[in-house]
């Protein structure tokens, strides 16, 4: 998300925890400027992919792809209106893994 009241890197904030972008908090961008930070992606990956839990498909729209998906998602405890779908979790994980400037690895089971 974008915070018009902030300047510099703080203008860019994670849609799931509202933390500002920083060198130690890399982010992946979705549609229309939506953002997920590495710590939130790690939590989402653990809950949805490893634990096979999360929000069931239904009455929510993914904050990253802006679609209603027929798959589970992760709802942020910090910002309950923000949900990321399984597909976007996996795509964001792949993006982080391919970025040589980001030291991120998929969490283990």
Image (spheres, helix red, strand yellow):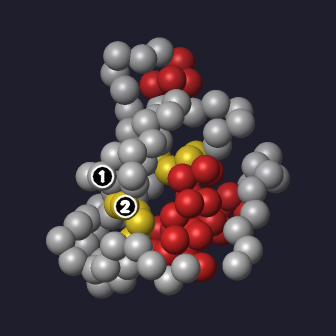
Residue at the image position 47 percent from the left and 68 percent from the top = 88
Vertical position of residue 30 compared to residue 84: above or below: above
Is 73 placed above or below 102 here? below
- The answer to whether one can see residue 33 in this image is no
Asked where in the image residue 71 lies, by quadrant, the reply is: bottom left
User: Which residue bears the numbered disc 1?
Assistant: 80
Which mark is on residue 42? none
Query: Residue 37 vs residue 97: left or right?
Result: left
Spatial CA distance of label 2 from label 1 is 6 Å
Residue tagged 2: 75
Residue 9 appears at what percent x and percent y? 55, 24
Compared across the picture, whether 19 is left or right of 38 comes to left
Q: Residue at x 56, y 60 (%)?
A: 43
Q: Are marks 2 and 1 in contact (CB under 8 Å)?
A: yes
Residue 74 visible (yes or no): yes
Q: Of the residues under marks 2 and 1, which one precedes in the sequence?
A: 2
């Amino acid at each position: 998300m974008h915070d018009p009241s902030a300047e510099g890197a703080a203008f860019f904030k994670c849609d799931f925890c509202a933390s500002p972008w920083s060198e130690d908090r890399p982010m992946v961008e979705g549609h229309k400027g939506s953002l997920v930070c590495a710590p939130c992606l790690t939590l989402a990956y653990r809950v949805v992919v490893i634990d096979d839990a999360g929000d069931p498909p239904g009455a929510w729209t993914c904050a990253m792809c802006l679609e209603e998906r027929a798959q589970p998602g992760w709802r942020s405890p910090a910002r309950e209106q923000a949900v990321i779908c399984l597909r976007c979790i996996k795509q964001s994980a792949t993006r982080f893994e391919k970025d040589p400037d980001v030291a991120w690895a998929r969490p283990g089971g």
